[in-house]
Structures are given as structure tokens and as C-alpha cells.
Image (cartoon, rainbow, N blue to C red):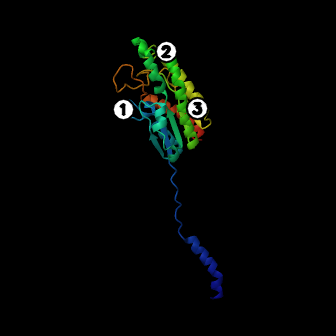
Amino acid sequence: MHRLTRLLLPAILALTVVGWPLAAPTLAAPPELLYLALGDSVPSGADLSDGIGYPYRLGQRLADASGRPVRLLNRARAGERSDGVLSSQMDDVRAIQPELVSVTVGANDFLVPAFECASATVDKNPQTRCDGMTLLRAVPQYESNLRAILHRLFSETGATIIVTTYFNPFPRGSACAPGTTDAALRFLNSTISDVAAEFAPRTMVVDLAPLFKGHEGREPTGWFSQSSLRVSCTDIHPNADGHDAIATAIWGGLAPRLALAP
């Protein structure tokens, strides 16, 4: 090879390499965030015309703020109690590994006995007598079930866990509200808060009771949908405004945990 060619060859190769077109870097799509919603008629969106309850609304906020696609698995069912969540809504949590889980359950565990108490009092049937002990007996079973639910979520997943308390749907002085409702809600909400505290810091409690005060009942001031049963005293499920309020309350506590703008 000619001496001059040998001297110029490295420079020629360098220019050739520099001149090659470079493929634009491929940006990886952000990973999907799996959100699992567990519970009863509230997260299921009961009595909403579009069925879009607070889990969907919360998931949309999360997707908008994070830029990540959110896949919602909403397994909540109307009428579900805590034992039902434990037995039929979370068998595969270890396999699916949700990143976010919300739990709204307990009203049917407590309020159904409360209504049964009220009915028994009205009926004055000695065979269906009911007193405060009936509600107290519901406490340990619910407490045990909720603890088992949260323990499984805490130990089998790395999820952030949201647990909500409950609201009173009945306007003050309403004939629909049995006297045991307030007592049942106090027992229920204190039990939720106490059990959830055992699984801190990954578990966040969102208290809905003060949020709904002043918005009991139906429009114009109430946040409750007309029941599909069309029976008096069954307008107990949040309407769109109520679900928006729940999603906003959860987002206010969740965003700082995920380092996202609230």
C-alpha cells in the first residue's frame, strides 16, 4: 500500500463512520400500572347510569399525572361483605402483582345487621329481638376478615393500599335512618382505621365520613343516586358528584406518596 494511502486511511475511515446515518433511539413505552379495586357496591358504581365509579375516575387521574397507562381491574360487587372479598376477589394477587389496590368493604357487614335491628324493633317480634350486642358481635368477625385482606395484600404484593371508611347516606332527621346507623358507622370506621394502621406505611386510610357531611340524600345538595330498586330509603349509593369527591380525596393523599403533583 502506498505510504500516503496508509497515512490517510484512518482519517478516511473516521469520516466514513461519522457520516453513517444513525437510527433514532427508540423510546420504551412507559410500563403499565395495574390498579386492583376490591369491595362492595360503592366501588362497583352501583346506581350510576354509566357505572363509572371512583376507581375509574381515580385511575384516569393517575394516568394523566404519571403518563403511564393504567389498567383497572374492578372486582367490586354490589352486596359484597368482607368474607366475600377475601374468598372471591383476590385469589391471584400474588400472580398479578397490582401496584395500587383500593379496598372499600364493611358496610354490608355492619349496616345490614343495623337495619335488621331496626326492623326487629319495629316488628316487636320476640323471635327477632335485637340489641346493641348484635352489632358488637359483627365487630370481631369483620376485624378478622379485614386484617386477613390487608395482610395478604401487604405480604403478597408490593402495592400501595388505599382503604376507605364509610359515609352516612341519610340526611339528619330522615325517617330512613335507623338509630343504630350512627353507632354502626362509628364501630365500622374506627375498626377500619385501627386495622389499617397495623399495615402502615403502605396502607393509606381515606375518611369519607366528613367528606359527605352536608351532602346526604339526593340532589340538589345530596351526592346520592336514585336507587334502581325505586324503593323508599334505598338511595344510598353515591352519584357522579359523590364518586368524583371520593376520587379527589384519595388522589389528594395518594399523589404525594407517588411523588406526583396532586
Q: Which amino acid does label 1 sit on?
A: Ser
Disc 3 packing (10 Å; few <14; some 14–19; many ≥20): many
Residue 170 visible within the image: no
Q: In this view, does 111 lie above or below 58?
A: above
Instruction: Tell me the distance, in whole angstroms, between the alpha carbons under discs 3 and 1.
Output: 32 Å
* Secondary structure category for the residue under label 3: helix
Say which residue appears at 46% left-offset and 23% top-offset. 111
Question: Which disc, if any, is residue 201?
Answer: none
Disc 2 packing (10 Å; few <14; some 14–19; many ≥20): some
Residue contact at pointers 2 and 3, CB within 8 angstroms: no
Q: What residue type is labelled 3?
A: Ala
Instruction: Tell me the distance, in whole angstroms, between the alpha carbons under discs 2 and 3.
Output: 28 Å
- Residue 126 at x, y percent in the picture: 42, 12
Q: Residue 181 vs residue 231: left or right?
A: right
Residue 22 visible within the image: yes
- Residue 133 at x, y percent in the picture: 52, 18
Of circles 2 and 3, the one toward us is 2
Say which residue appears at 48% left-offset and 18% top-offset. 181
Q: Which residue has dot 2 on it?
A: 131
Question: Which disc, if any, is residue 196?
Answer: 3
Q: Is residue 198 above or below residue 23?
A: above
Towards the viewer: 3 or 121: 121
Q: Which residue has dot 1 on it?
A: 49
Farthest residue, direction bottom: 2
Say which residue appears at 51% left-offset and 16% top-offset. 132
Q: How many marks?
A: 3
Instruction: Tell me the distance, in whole angstroms, between the alpha carbons under discs 2 and 1.
Output: 38 Å
Q: Residue 183 vs residue 12: left or right?
A: left
Towards the viewer: 3 or 31: 31
- Residue 48 at x, y percent in the picture: 38, 31
Q: In this view, does 89 lie above or below 220?
A: below
Mark 2 or 1, nearer chain start: 1
